[in-house]
Amino acid sequence: MPDTLLTVDHLKKTYESSTGVVEAIGDIGFTMRRGELVCIVGPSGCGKTTLLKCIAGLLKPTAGSVVLDGKEVTGPPPNMALVFQEYGRSLYPWLTVRGNVELPLKHKKLSKARRTRLVEDALEAVGLSHAGGSYPWQLSGGMQQRVAIARAVAYQPEVLIMDEPFAAVDAQTRADLEDLVRRLHLDRGMSILFVTHDIDESVYLGERVIVLSKSPTWVQEDLHIDLDPQRDQITTRALPRFTELRTHVYEQIQRAKRGEATRPVG
Amino acid sequence: MTLYTSTVRRPPQRPNLWARMGSSILYAIGVPVLLLVIWGVWGTIAPAKFFPSPLTIAEAFVDTWIGPAFVTDVLPSLARLAAAIVLAVVIGIAAGTLIGLTRWLRELLEPLLEFFRAIPPPVLIPVFVALLGVTDQMKVIVIVFGSLWPVLLNTVEGVRSTDSVMTETARSFALTPTERLFSLVLPAASPRIMAGVRQTLSVALIMMVISEMFYSSSGLGFQVAYFQRNYLIAQMWSGIVLLGLIGVLLAVVFTIVERRVLRWYHGIKEVERA
């Protein structure tokens, strides 16, 4: 496929521990096309974060490979941006909001004017134009996560990776932030890989939902979400199709937890 | 977290700045003034040779320190102190950063550093005198050697405990090592470093006095010791007062710098308390 952006191939990750070798990721393989929004869900403790760190080049897989845009990932690739769950520890409190968003752009060879434009544009995209001069710790949790998203947007990555980004914010803020992610995807055509443990969130956000098995992890199902791209917290979530899909994913996760699903061969 | 609410939070602005400053100054000098008055009255009622009245000391202060002694004794002492503080802070932060970031170096040096820190610095004066003679260099080195440890060890501690998520953020955005040092590692360690600098300042002042008390023929520490040996009690006390004032001045300058450097840190604390 010419428009394949990300290929994860037979990825395996084991840890040495005092009780022997722990197999965190058994064998994960999937591809992601350019401009797609893919959600990854799985039972807790299934190695979602480990998978993400391998994809982001922060951890070295034991076997297998990650290829981004035709290049094998061996360290953090320059065309990828990450949004962490712990926004409070991911933003630098000694920098203002603007400073945080601008920081990763400093070593990209951009003119000052271009950099400022990118920063302002990213802040605008997340609805924080008014807060550029504030410090992150003066903002609410949801706003802080918006700053982290703005930082990733300004970086202009090929792919945006989000690791349970809304797990630590309240439900209403969460809905707003989900819509923000949908908007970034639709308006800016951003490719987003979104990891979550929330089944509803994965179905609401994703065009595809990849369901992971429990550890040692493999891909249990790769599900196409055939909902309209224009989604809405009220109407979309009330659709019968939405309910069907979330029930389906829910059952898959339950099966994964019980370890009923069988591991594919190869 | 209870820390965060939905709007932009700013530290509370208290009204009436002048009234507040006035009252805090009143509070700050109230007790010292009262003590001086009691001391003065006591001194007139029951004169004691070793505790002259504050007025006598004030007179001695003007006679002793405002004049040529300021140039021959006070300024050189202060110059050595300043040079030594700059050296100690720069060496402490530079070496501390290097040691904190290099695991094998840290493991190699930590016992040694603890040992050096445990040596009471004044006992090294004879060694440095033997090596360098009674020179300005010797005095500066003695001050540096005594006051280096707090800032060095605190920097090591601060640098090595950089938050893991902040580090991963820097890695994922491919920050260069220099950017990582100046945008992440040093700012993150700065509260610890400043705590070390605060201790370094007070140790440095002590070491300045001690370095001048032995083998020396000028300087504040020498003068105080000289007055004491010659029963110039009021002058001796005036020297002690001057040293106290220098200590206060150092603390004030430090607080101003610290407030600026750690504005974000105090801001977080204030938001947490609110």
Image: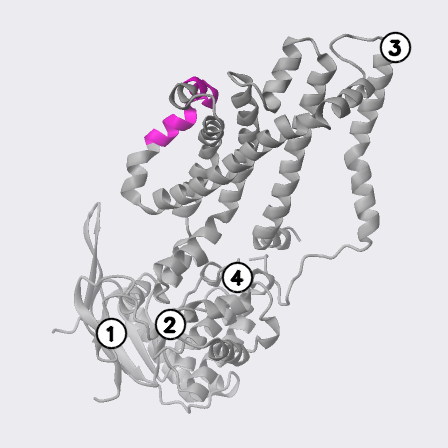
Give yes or no for contact between labels 2 and 3 (Cβ–Cβ under 8 Å): no
Residue receiving disc 3: B45
Depth check, mark 1 against mark 3: the one in front is 3
Q: Residue at x 40, y 89 (%)?
A: A227
Query: Label 1 marks which chain's residue?
Result: A
Q: Which mark is residue A95?
A: 4
From the top left corner, tell me how far across and down residue A79 is, in percent.
33, 75
Residue type indicated by callout 4: Leu
Cα distance in 3D space between marks 4 and 2: 19 Å
- Bounds of the magenta span? B111-126
Mark closest to the chain's N terminus, 2 or 1: 2
At mark 1, the secondary structure is: strand
Residue receiving disc 2: A81
Residue type indicated by callout 1: Gln
Give yes or no for contact between labels 1 and 4 (Cβ–Cβ under 8 Å): no
Cα distance in 3D space between marks 2 and 1: 26 Å
Q: Residue at x 49, y 26 (%)?
A: B139
Binning the other alpha carbons within 10 Å of mark 3 as few (below 14), some (14 to 19) or many (20 upward) gives: few
Q: Residue at x 34, y 79 (%)?
A: A158
Residue A170 visible in rendering: no
Residue A93 visible in rendering: yes
Do circles 1 and 3 both sit on a common chain?
Answer: no
Tell me the quadrant of the picture where the N terminus of chain B can be found. Answer: bottom right
